[in-house]
Image (cartoon, grey):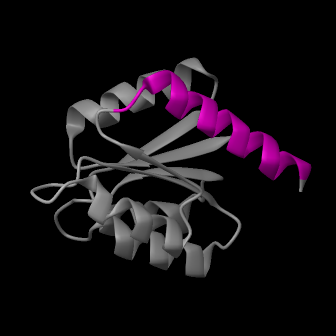
Amino acid sequence: MRVLIIDDDEQMRILLRQIMEWRGYDVSEAENGKVGVRIQRDTPAELIVTDLIMPEQEGLETIRTIKNEFPGVKIVAISGGGRIGPDAYLPAARELGADRVFSKPFDIGELVEAVEELFAVSNKS
């Protein structure tokens, strides 16, 4: 199972990569939405974890683009919300197709549980 992590924070990408690889997933990563969309087009992931506030192309646009091209992909949106807080962005991410949303800082165990639940759902369909 392939996971794509899109986040401009290198430390967050490293943390998420290590956790996902430890759980047995094949992981790709991107530093912004533009690169993430390109990677998804080249080697599609079944699940994407994306930050929402990033340079180049932010997460909401990334979710919209990916859901249009890959309607079956599962998406987990994460956000610290920048200056105005995550509450402004996470509901919009859900409306655009994110399957789960998490405010930073989040409980890593809850994120892993969400990823595993989403993979279980996609394997049944």
The location of residue 115, given as percent across then percent down, is: 61, 38
Residue occupying image coordinates x 24% and y 47%: 80
Q: Is residue 65 above or below residue 46?
A: below
Residue 7 in the image: state x and y as whole percent. Answer: 30, 48
Q: Nearer the viewer, residue 108 or 1?
A: 108
State the residue in front, 32 or 98: 98
Most frequent secondary structure within the magenta stretch: helix
Whether residue 73 is situated above or below residue 4 in the rendered picture:
below
Identity of the residue drawn at 32% across and 64% down: 89
Answer whether residue 108 is magenta in the image: yes
Q: Is residue 99 left or right of residue 96?
A: right
Q: Specify whether 77 is left or right of 74.
A: left
Closer-to-camera residue (77/69): 77
Residue drawn at x 36%, y 76% is 61
How many numbered marks have been drawn onto this rendered protein structure?
0
- For the C terminus, the image quarter is bottom right
Q: Relative to 11, does residue 86 appear above or below in the rendering?
A: below
Quarter of the image with the N terminus is top right
* Residue at 51% in and 33% down: 111
In the orientation shown, which residue stands out farthest toward the right? Answer: 124
Decide whether residue 104 is among the magenta residues. Answer: no
Q: Quadrant of residue 22?
A: top right
Residue 98, image x and y in percent? Answer: 53, 62
Which stretch did the figure color magenta?
106-124
Residue 35 % position (x, y)? 33, 63
Q: As drawn, which residue projects farthest toward the front?
A: 87
Farthest-out residue, top = 22
